Image (cartoon, rainbow, N blue to C red):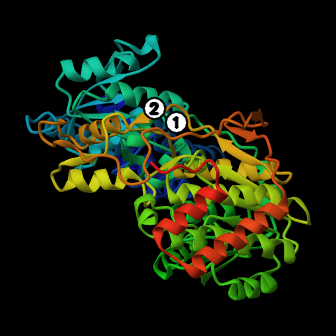
Amino acid sequence: MVIVAYFVALWIRLDFSLRSIAYFHHLVELLPVIVIAYFIAFKLAKIDKTLWTSPSVDEALRVSMASLLGFAIVFVFCEYVTPVQLPLSVHFIALMLVVLSMIFVRFSYRIYRLLSSLSGNNSEHCKRTLIVGAGEAGTMLLKEILQNKKYNNKVIGFLDDDAYKIGKLVMGIPVLAKSEEVGTLAIKENIDVIYIAMPSVSVKKQNEIAKLCYGSQAKVYMLTGSQDMIQAAGIHRSIREMSIEDLLGRKEVHLKHEDLKELIHDKSILVTGAGGSIGSELVRQIVLYQPKSVIMLDISENSIYDLQSELNIWRKEKKIAKDVEFLPIIGSIRDIAVLDMIFERSKFDLVFHAAAHKHVPLMESMPAEAVKNNIFGSHHIIELCKKHKVKQMVHISTDKAVNPTNVMGATKRFVEKMIQTIGKDGPTKFVAVRFGNVLGSSGSVIPLFKKQIASGGPVTVTDPEMIRYFMTITEAVSLILQAASYGEGGEIFVLDMGEPVKILDLAEKMISLAGYVPYQDIDIEFTGLRPGEKLFEELLMGEEGLKETPNPLIKVTKPMEISREQIIREIEYLRKVVAVDQSRGEIIKALMETVPTYRQS
């Protein structure tokens, strides 16, 4: 290509006349020098390493710089080494021809693929698509759709918040309207797929746009992660289907990471119930702050094995520092001898107590098991923390502990009492963190609804008026860690659960997200309240008052005035009742005596 460029340049320079023949022998003598010079220049610029399927502006710049280097070498050689001369203009014309021809050849394949994609993506069978966000992420997504054969989308247009972009074209695709018009436009244009490609905006803004898409019957996907992550891992890995979490519009959590690092870094930590939804997420977030060690205790071997395998993968991916130790232990919080051995061996600085029986209807049928596990097991953890001089213990509580109407809630309320009384004296700071339902946890309605929708329905809702508070597992655990950093001892921290959610609305939205029409494609049936269930959950008892903390999503309640001796007497009373008579009636009676706010529903 370089040789041809020089011959053409010589011909152009001499007005395309036969006079150029007189210079041909000069050019022939210089050909070895020209070829070697450009070969060295192209090799230094690694032009031969570039994939022709993905040329870019960077590639064009490197071709230009390499060609300029080749030109400089040839010019210096002709000027100072050899008497053989060519007009300077020949070298300049050849330089331009080399650059243009190489860029054209390299981009021609991409142009061909783009034209093929555009023609292919205009077929009637392609999914009509909108992209919300006409910035860099949206442009990258459009390129991915056009170039990757796995996509079967016909992009109708973009939407963007920037009014200046409306009416403009991005790679030939028009920016049709502002982002808030996505719902109306999706219905008007009969859109099948909507991509929200705005990873740099706030979570709140993304959730607002997601809500506008609801009701359009279009499949909605969200582009997550920073631009660097998108470019490094491939944009297709950053695309996820819109979930029910996006429609609930939870607030964005802002953490003081320096507080969490001080709490966790280089500490020895125990997480009980580490195989559960909250416990496992606690472990995942804790290991990122480089503790000295994390002991993962659970009675379920399968869940602990899965968590250990996940952490091993993280270690290989270098998400976890190689000197962070994580050790799974199978054991029960009911077995104080095993617990004592674990505490003695590991010398914990911090304990997160998430182990508990939490399933409301199951605990209604076997209340003795709830007492033995939730109350007696928690008492073991509290006493061992004091005995082994653990610096802090954090108990994971629940909104069902507030004016409980079920056995599970009553047992968790009793543990809150223990935290605020037994834990007052001694070296350990005891705190509890209270919050509501967690999206996606093993006991949540969402996994149940997903299974029911996948099987064709019906979706079962207990009562059309039932209301619950929801937060994501990641959000809940982040706030638990932040609350722990505020703990001075004896506090019950209450997490801001946001706006209450009607379970019926949740079911309808999940059916719509799955691409079905509620009551038409998939029916909803009402089954009535289960034993121990409330229509409305509470986060605060009547006698409690809330105080602010440095994080607006975390509040703290006023400590209770209960004597340590009273709590010890009540624990012993419960032990005697369980030991003598495990019938439901006696256990319920004992719980109502020791938890005055407990009333059966």
At which x and y percent is residue 269?
74, 70
Considering only vertical position in the picture, is 237 above or below 217? below
Q: Are marks 1 and 2 in contact (CB under 8 Å)?
A: yes
Nearer to me, 294 or 161: 294
* Quarter holding residue 519: top left
Residue that badge 1 annotates: 250
Q: Please name the residue shown 47% across and 31% down the image.
A: 206
Q: Residue furthest right?
A: 426
Residue 513, numbered circle: none
Q: What kind of element bears circle 2?
A: helix
Considering only vertical position in the picture, is 288 above or below 258? below
Q: Is residue 119 left or right of residue 16?
A: left
Please indicate, yes or no, whether residue 304 appears anywhere in the rendered image: yes
Q: Please name the residue shown 15% across and 43% down the image.
A: 522
Q: Is residue 209 left or right of residue 587?
A: left
* Quarter holding residue 497: top right
The number of discs equals 2
Cα–Cα gap, marks 1 and 2: 8 Å
- Amino acid type of the residue that numbered disc 2 sits on in the rendered structure: Asn
Q: Residue furthest left?
A: 124
Residue 207, numbered circle: 2
Considering only vertical position in the picture, is 316 above or below 497? below
Nearer to me, 346 or 94: 346
Nearer to me, 256 or 231: 256
At which x and y percent is residue 218?
23, 33
At which x and y percent is residue 156?
23, 26
Nearer to me, 295 or 311: 295
Q: Please name the residue shown 29% across and 46% down the image.
A: 528
- Amino acid type of the residue that numbered disc 1 sits on in the rendered structure: Arg
At which x and y percent is residue 307?
53, 73
